[in-house]
Image (cartoon, helix red, strand yellow):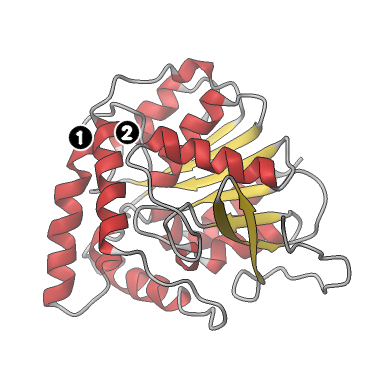
């Protein structure tokens, strides 16, 4: 069941105004938002560790939603979705598949960031016919060198942020440099632009379960990424402390024909720091 009768609603192309919707399947009620013109292959967004839909940068989503049907959603146990956060990335991919099936789509484009990129890889490997194009940002492959260290880095930076009364993302996503610090502040401010129907923040328990899943993903045997034949765009900053930038290069080597963009003097959130350059590049990549 779904409350998605959108026939007489005005076209929304801004994520800050996208209506909150739900669909229930397999005992879980998934919260999601839709924007952009309906029809065609939708672009489904897979969000990062500890994030809800409110963590998407409107400067990245909105340009894509100008011409494409865009869907953001909360995984089970996160934000406004019910259910439990699973302790493995594979199960998260299975949940995403369940959600996409419930919406009735048999072909999607995927935009993913960080942990979302890990989920997206598993989804595309398990359901190769489902994913047409793949965008992997700030992420790395299963078994990638030092992915399991994300946990320590995350806890250290949460502590640093607490001591300075700032948002942990300022430390985790951006360089503490003359360019990084203002980019961080601007990004955090953009995330506050949505004022209606905001998600509640992730619980500590759910966050810890996600960290466990990432650690497991990092310590697992690598997946055979040569099976990914979709056009793939990979992007990161050159100084990602969370999911080391070399892992983006590793993905690029292992996914044949993929395209790689590395932004200078930028960290994990390089695509947000360079949104003015990245948004047109990704729109172009996703265009039919």
From the viewer's perspective, tell me whether residue 145 is left or right of residue 252.
left
Q: Nearer the viewer, residue 93 or 281?
A: 93
Q: Nearer the viewer, mark 1 or mark 2?
A: 1
Residue at 71% in and 68% down: 13
Q: In this orientation, does residue 255 appear?
A: yes
User: Residue at 80% of width from left, 59% of height from top?
Assistant: 37
Q: Which residue is located at x 65 percent, y 48 percent? A: 43
- The image quarter containing residue 69 is bottom right
> Of all residues shown, which one is farthest toward the front?
27
* Residue linked to disc 2: 247
175 displayed left or right of 4: left
Disc 1 to disc 2: CB gap under 8 Å: yes
Residue 261 appears in the picture as rendered: no
Q: Which label was assigned to residue 40?
A: none
Distance CA(mark 1)–CA(mark 2): 9 Å
**Element type at mark 2:** helix
Residue 108 on image: x %, y % = 68, 40
**Image quarter in which the C terminus is found:** top right
Q: Residue furthest bottom?
A: 195
Badge number at residue 146:
1
- Name the N-terminal-most of marks 1 and 2: 1
């Amino acid at each position: 069941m779904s409350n998605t009768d959108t026939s007489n609603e005005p076209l929304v192309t801004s994520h800050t105004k996208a209506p909150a919707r739900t669909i229930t399947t397999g005992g879980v009620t998934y919260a999601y938002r839709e924007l952009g013109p309906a029809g065609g292959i939708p672009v489904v967004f897979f969000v990062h560790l500890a994030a809800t839909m409110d963590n998407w940068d409107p400067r990245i989503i909105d340009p894509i939603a100008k011409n494409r049907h865009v869907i953001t959603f909360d995984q089970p146990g996160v934000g406004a979705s019910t259910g439990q956060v699973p302790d493995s990335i594979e199960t998260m991919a299975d949940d995403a598949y369940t959600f996409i099936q419930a919406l009735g789509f048999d072909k999607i484009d995927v935009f993913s960031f960080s942990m979302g990129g890990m989920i997206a890889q598993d989804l595309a490997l398990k359901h190769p016919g489902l994913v047409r194009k793949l965008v992997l940002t700030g992420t790395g492959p299963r078994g990638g060198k030092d992915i399991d260290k994300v946990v320590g880095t995350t806890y250290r930076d949460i502590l640093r942020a607490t001591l300075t009364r700032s948002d942990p993302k300022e430390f985790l996503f951006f360089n503490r440099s003359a360019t990084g610090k203002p980019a961080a502040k601007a990004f955090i401010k953009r995330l506050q632009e949505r004022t209606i129907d905001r998600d509640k923040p992730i619980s500590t328990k759910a966050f810890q379960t996600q960290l466990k899943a990432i650690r497991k993903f990092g310590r697992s045997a690598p997946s055979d990424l040569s099976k990914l034949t979709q056009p793939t765009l990979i992007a990161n900053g050159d100084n990602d402390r969370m999911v080391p930038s070399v892992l983006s290069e590793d993905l690029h080597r292992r996914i044949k024909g993929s395209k790689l963009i590395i932004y200078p003097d930028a960290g994990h959130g390089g695509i947000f720091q360079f949104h003015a350059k990245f948004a047109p590049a990704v729109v172009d990549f996703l265009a039919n």
